[in-house]
Image (cartoon, rainbow, N blue to C red):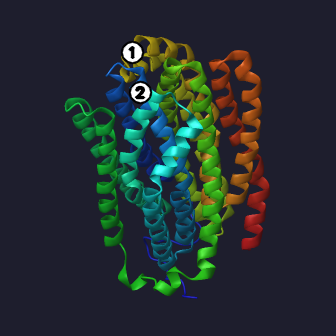
Amino acid sequence: MTAASPASPSDPAGPFHVTHRLILAIALPMTLGFLTTPLLGLVDTAVVGRMGQATLLAGLAVGAIIFDLIFTTFNFLRAATTGLVAQAYGRGDRREQQAVFWRSLVIALTAGVAVVALSPLLLAGGLWLMDPPAEVAAVTRTYFLCRMLSAPAALANYAILGFVLGRGQGTTGLLLQALINGVNIVLSILLGLVLGWGVLGVAIATVTGEVIGAMAGFAIVYSRFDRKDAPSWAMIFDRERLRPLFGLNRDIMIRSFVLVAAFALMTRIGTAFGPVTLAANAVLMTVFLVAGYYLDGLANAAEQLIGRSIGAHYRPAFDRALKLTMTWSLGLAVVTTVALLLFGHGLVDLLTTAPDVRAVAYAYLPWAALTAMTGALAFLMDGVFIGATWSRDMRNMMLAALTGYVAALAILVPAFGNHGLWAGLNLFLLMRGLFLLARIPAKAGQTFRSAQ
């Protein structure tokens, strides 16, 4: 095994103190960065929604959920990279940080090429699963097949962002997210609305943004590597070092697939309520994503600080990071819910000009606003478990929450229709957070005992 590189001032090892300032230094840039993602969703939805056809908006929604169903299962590339890099950062092991990056990047590019090759089959499976009307499926097909060309770049961006977040470099993460989504937003408006390319223009914009972001991200990360710490290829692909990465990847992939499957199930059930309700739910899911991405910055702070504390074998930093990030997360969740209740109608109006879609969305807006509060703990706990690399427990608790979610839908939807569908989503989010929180005392005790 190659010895760890000595710590440098930029890679401090050992005990450290967690402060509000340290948390916000990571969380605020990433919150701003992640907010560009739902902003992108808002723009894409608004571009298509302003064409005034519920079919186009529904087709975009179905295409996006199929795409997310596939790509969120690859979120392990980002999450596992963050956790492993953060722990190496806590140990001051710069060589292993580089090695984790190269392992993840190779996996990302290989998987991306495979996904592009399989895209026709993936589309067929997605349409079978979602079973949209024929006119909606035609829109979905155009959007999906074009957007899938971004797969290698999109997955490479997962690995790059994971490395950046693992080192707590929130400002760099903000720069990359803003670049990817900024290019995407500008081109979506230009191609989709100004030039009138519609859904195809939105898809082309996404591909372009991902490619530009991947090229810029790689250049930034590689330029910062210290060549004297460069790992050998034998170290990068050492079986003993690959095993933890693949174990994390497997568990997080299952967890991510289950999460997106839960959202896909919601969309699938929503199709039974007709195109207008399906379109309204798509608008409100964008509102939900605004709340989720808004809180993800704090989850990223938890990932880095929890992983760093475990790498440094320092329990006080773990406990304080958990306490402070939870305080900030729950506080911001309350603010977000109140803001959505007060200003949500204006947000819906921005997303669609269709009067019938607006009317239905208004009726279910309180449920979407509530997701910020019911989901805050779940988002944060994901960050804690990713940073700690407790992937098996995260996977198992997700499966338990899914079981409860399916049971809730079976009871609530027949009785309350679309209200029951949204109530089930809120219960699912709440169960995820509470189940994971209950596991922390035992897991933390076990982890820090074994580190002594």
- Image location of residue 158, percent across then percent down: 45, 57
Q: Is residue 179 above or below residue 132?
A: below
Residue at image position (59%, 75%) is: 242
Q: Is residue 349 above or below residue 242?
A: above
- Image location of residue 74, percent across then percent down: 53, 56
- Image location of residue 205, percent across then percent down: 29, 44
Left or right of 109? Residue 1 is right
The amino acid beneath tag 2 is: Leu
Image quarter of the C terminus? bottom right
Q: Is residue 201 above or below residue 84?
A: above
Reading the chain from its start, which is encountered first: label 2 or label 1? 2
The amino acid beneath tag 1 is: Ala
Residue at image position (37%, 58%) is: 153
Instruction: Mark 2 and mark 1 in contact? Answer it, CB < 8 Å.
Output: yes
Secondary structure of the residue carrying numbered label 2: helix
Residue at image position (45%, 11%) is: 356
Residue at image position (56%, 69%) is: 90
Residue 351: quadrant of the picture: top left
Mark 2 = which residue? 57
Q: Is residue 286 visible?
A: yes
> Given the current orientation, which residue lies at the most extreme left position?
195
Around disc 2, counting alpha carbons within 10 Å, would you say few (fewer than 14), some (14 to 19), or many (20 or more)?
many
Q: Is residue 19 visible?
A: no
Q: Nearer the viewer, residue 313 or 293?
A: 293
Left or right of 357? Residue 422 is right
Q: Nearer the viewer, residue 343 or 43?
A: 43
Secondary structure of the residue carrying numbered label 1: loop
Q: CA distance from mark 2 to mark 1?
A: 10 Å
> Given the current orientation, which residue lies at the most extreme front position?
134
Mark 1 = which residue? 354
